[in-house]
Image: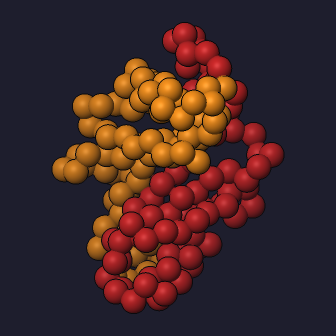
Chain colours: A orange, B red
Amino acid sequence: MKLRVFITLKPGVLDPQGEAIRHALSALGFEGVNGVRQGKMIELDLAEENADKAVDQARSMCEKLLSNTVIESYRIEPA
Amino acid sequence: MKLRVFITLKPGVLDPQGEAIRHALSALGFEGVNGVRQGKMIELDLAEENADKAVDQARSMCEKLLSNTVIESYRIEPA
Protein backbone atom coordinates (compact mmCIF):
# COMPACT_ATOMS: atom_id res chain seq x y z
CA MET A 1 0.00 0.00 0.00
CA LYS A 2 1.02 3.59 -0.52
CA LEU A 3 1.76 5.91 2.38
CA ARG A 4 2.81 9.52 2.64
CA VAL A 5 5.27 10.63 5.28
CA PHE A 6 5.48 14.32 6.17
CA ILE A 7 8.62 15.45 7.95
CA THR A 8 8.70 18.90 9.48
CA LEU A 9 11.09 20.77 11.71
CA LYS A 10 9.86 20.96 15.30
CA PRO A 11 8.57 24.36 16.42
CA GLY A 12 11.43 26.56 17.55
CA VAL A 13 14.01 24.91 15.32
CA LEU A 14 15.57 27.46 12.98
CA ASP A 15 14.61 26.91 9.32
CA PRO A 16 17.13 28.67 7.06
CA GLN A 17 15.57 27.16 3.91
CA GLY A 18 12.16 28.56 4.84
CA GLU A 19 13.71 31.95 5.61
CA ALA A 20 15.44 31.96 2.22
CA ILE A 21 12.09 31.30 0.51
CA ARG A 22 10.46 34.09 2.51
CA HIS A 23 13.14 36.55 1.42
CA ALA A 24 12.90 35.43 -2.20
CA LEU A 25 9.10 35.83 -2.17
CA SER A 26 9.46 39.30 -0.72
CA ALA A 27 12.08 40.19 -3.37
CA LEU A 28 9.59 39.04 -6.04
CA GLY A 29 7.03 41.49 -4.67
CA PHE A 30 4.81 39.14 -2.67
CA GLU A 31 3.62 41.02 0.39
CA GLY A 32 2.04 39.77 3.61
CA VAL A 33 4.11 36.61 3.96
CA ASN A 34 4.41 36.22 7.72
CA GLY A 35 6.34 32.97 7.71
CA VAL A 36 7.54 30.06 5.61
CA ARG A 37 8.60 26.63 6.87
CA GLN A 38 9.94 23.97 4.56
CA GLY A 39 9.45 20.29 5.19
CA LYS A 40 9.77 17.03 3.31
CA MET A 41 7.18 14.69 1.89
CA ILE A 42 8.12 11.10 1.16
CA GLU A 43 5.80 8.77 -0.75
CA LEU A 44 6.36 5.12 0.14
CA ASP A 45 5.03 2.26 -1.96
CA LEU A 46 5.15 -0.75 0.36
CA ALA A 47 4.42 -4.39 -0.50
CA GLU A 48 2.64 -4.74 2.88
CA GLU A 49 -1.12 -4.51 2.26
CA ASN A 50 -2.28 -4.49 5.90
CA ALA A 51 -2.72 -0.80 6.78
CA ASP A 52 -1.67 -1.10 10.44
CA LYS A 53 1.42 -3.14 9.63
CA ALA A 54 2.39 -0.78 6.80
CA VAL A 55 2.11 2.23 9.11
CA ASP A 56 4.20 0.42 11.75
CA GLN A 57 6.84 -0.30 9.11
CA ALA A 58 6.82 3.34 7.97
CA ARG A 59 7.12 4.52 11.58
CA SER A 60 10.17 2.32 12.04
CA MET A 61 11.66 3.76 8.81
CA CYS A 62 11.09 7.29 10.13
CA GLU A 63 12.78 6.51 13.43
CA LYS A 64 15.76 4.80 11.83
CA LEU A 65 16.38 6.75 8.64
CA LEU A 66 13.85 9.22 7.30
CA SER A 67 13.68 11.78 10.07
CA ASN A 68 16.08 13.25 12.58
CA THR A 69 13.86 12.90 15.62
CA VAL A 70 15.93 15.35 17.63
CA ILE A 71 14.83 18.29 15.50
CA GLU A 72 12.11 16.87 13.24
CA SER A 73 8.69 15.39 13.75
CA TYR A 74 6.90 13.12 11.29
CA ARG A 75 3.33 12.25 10.37
CA ILE A 76 2.22 9.20 8.38
CA GLU A 77 -0.92 9.18 6.22
CA PRO A 78 -2.39 6.73 3.74
CA ALA A 79 -1.85 8.12 0.21
CA MET B 1 -4.18 32.22 6.91
CA LYS B 2 -1.95 29.18 6.81
CA LEU B 3 -1.59 27.06 3.70
CA ARG B 4 0.38 23.97 2.85
CA VAL B 5 1.94 23.53 -0.56
CA PHE B 6 2.99 20.07 -1.69
CA ILE B 7 5.46 19.90 -4.54
CA THR B 8 6.08 16.56 -6.21
CA LEU B 9 7.98 15.42 -9.26
CA LYS B 10 5.68 14.64 -12.16
CA PRO B 11 5.22 10.94 -12.95
CA GLY B 12 8.04 9.70 -15.17
CA VAL B 13 10.57 12.23 -13.93
CA LEU B 14 13.60 10.45 -12.46
CA ASP B 15 13.89 10.89 -8.68
CA PRO B 16 17.49 10.16 -7.58
CA GLN B 17 16.77 11.27 -4.00
CA GLY B 18 13.89 8.81 -3.74
CA GLU B 19 16.05 6.05 -5.20
CA ALA B 20 18.80 6.81 -2.67
CA ILE B 21 16.26 6.48 0.16
CA ARG B 22 15.01 3.18 -1.30
CA HIS B 23 18.54 1.79 -1.39
CA ALA B 24 19.28 2.99 2.14
CA LEU B 25 16.06 1.39 3.45
CA SER B 26 16.96 -1.86 1.77
CA ALA B 27 20.50 -1.69 3.23
CA LEU B 28 18.92 -1.24 6.68
CA GLY B 29 16.97 -4.47 6.19
CA PHE B 30 13.55 -3.07 5.26
CA GLU B 31 12.00 -5.41 2.71
CA GLY B 32 9.07 -4.94 0.38
CA VAL B 33 9.74 -1.31 -0.50
CA ASN B 34 8.52 -1.07 -4.09
CA GLY B 35 9.18 2.61 -4.58
CA VAL B 36 10.04 5.87 -2.88
CA ARG B 37 9.42 9.38 -4.21
CA GLN B 38 10.57 12.47 -2.38
CA GLY B 39 8.74 15.76 -2.57
CA LYS B 40 8.65 19.06 -0.73
CA MET B 41 6.14 20.53 1.65
CA ILE B 42 6.08 24.26 2.22
CA GLU B 43 3.98 25.84 4.97
CA LEU B 44 2.99 29.41 4.18
CA ASP B 45 1.66 31.81 6.78
CA LEU B 46 -0.04 34.57 4.77
CA ALA B 47 -1.53 37.81 6.05
CA GLU B 48 -4.42 37.37 3.57
CA GLU B 49 -7.42 36.00 5.48
CA ASN B 50 -9.73 35.39 2.51
CA ALA B 51 -9.25 31.71 1.63
CA ASP B 52 -9.76 32.09 -2.14
CA LYS B 53 -7.41 35.06 -2.37
CA ALA B 54 -4.79 33.31 -0.23
CA VAL B 55 -4.89 30.23 -2.48
CA ASP B 56 -4.59 32.46 -5.56
CA GLN B 57 -1.56 34.14 -4.02
CA ALA B 58 0.00 30.77 -3.17
CA ARG B 59 -0.66 29.53 -6.72
CA SER B 60 1.15 32.54 -8.10
CA MET B 61 4.07 31.86 -5.72
CA CYS B 62 4.23 28.27 -6.97
CA GLU B 63 4.27 29.34 -10.60
CA LYS B 64 6.92 32.01 -10.08
CA LEU B 65 9.23 30.54 -7.45
CA LEU B 66 8.29 27.50 -5.43
CA SER B 67 7.95 24.86 -8.11
CA ASN B 68 9.63 24.08 -11.39
CA THR B 69 6.48 23.51 -13.41
CA VAL B 70 8.36 21.72 -16.19
CA ILE B 71 9.10 18.72 -13.97
CA GLU B 72 7.07 19.33 -10.82
CA SER B 73 3.41 19.62 -9.96
CA TYR B 74 2.01 21.34 -6.90
CA ARG B 75 -1.06 21.09 -4.70
CA ILE B 76 -2.29 23.73 -2.25
CA GLU B 77 -4.28 22.86 0.88
CA PRO B 78 -5.46 24.86 3.88
CA ALA B 79 -3.26 23.94 6.88
Residue closer to the observer: B18 or A53: A53
Picture coordinates of residue A70 (x, y %)?
Answer: 25, 31
Relative horizontal placement of residue B4, taking residue B32 as reference (left or right): left
As drawn, A49 above or below B70: above
Picture coordinates of residue A35 (x, y %)?
Answer: 31, 67
Residue most toward the right?
Answer: B12
Say which quarter of the image contains residue B78: bottom left
Residue closer to the observer: B30 or B55: B30
As drawn, A70 above or below A10: above
Q: Is residue B57 visible?
A: no
Residue at 37% over, 25% down: A63
Residue most toward the left?
Answer: A12
Picture coordinates of residue B8 (x, y %)?
Answer: 62, 53
Relative horizontal placement of residue B8, taking residue A27 as reference (left or right): right
Residue at 40% over, 62% down: B43
User: How many numbered marks have been drawn onto this rendered protein structure?
Assistant: 0
As drawn, B22 above or below B66: above
Picture coordinates of residue B6 (x, y %)?
Answer: 54, 58
Q: Quadrant of the N terminus of chain A?
A: top right
Residue at 54% over, 45% down: A78
Q: Is residue B2 visible?
A: yes
Residue at 36% over, 57% down: A37
Say which quarter of the image contains residue A72: top left
As drawn, A2 above or below B79: above
Residue closer to the observer: A20 or B77: B77
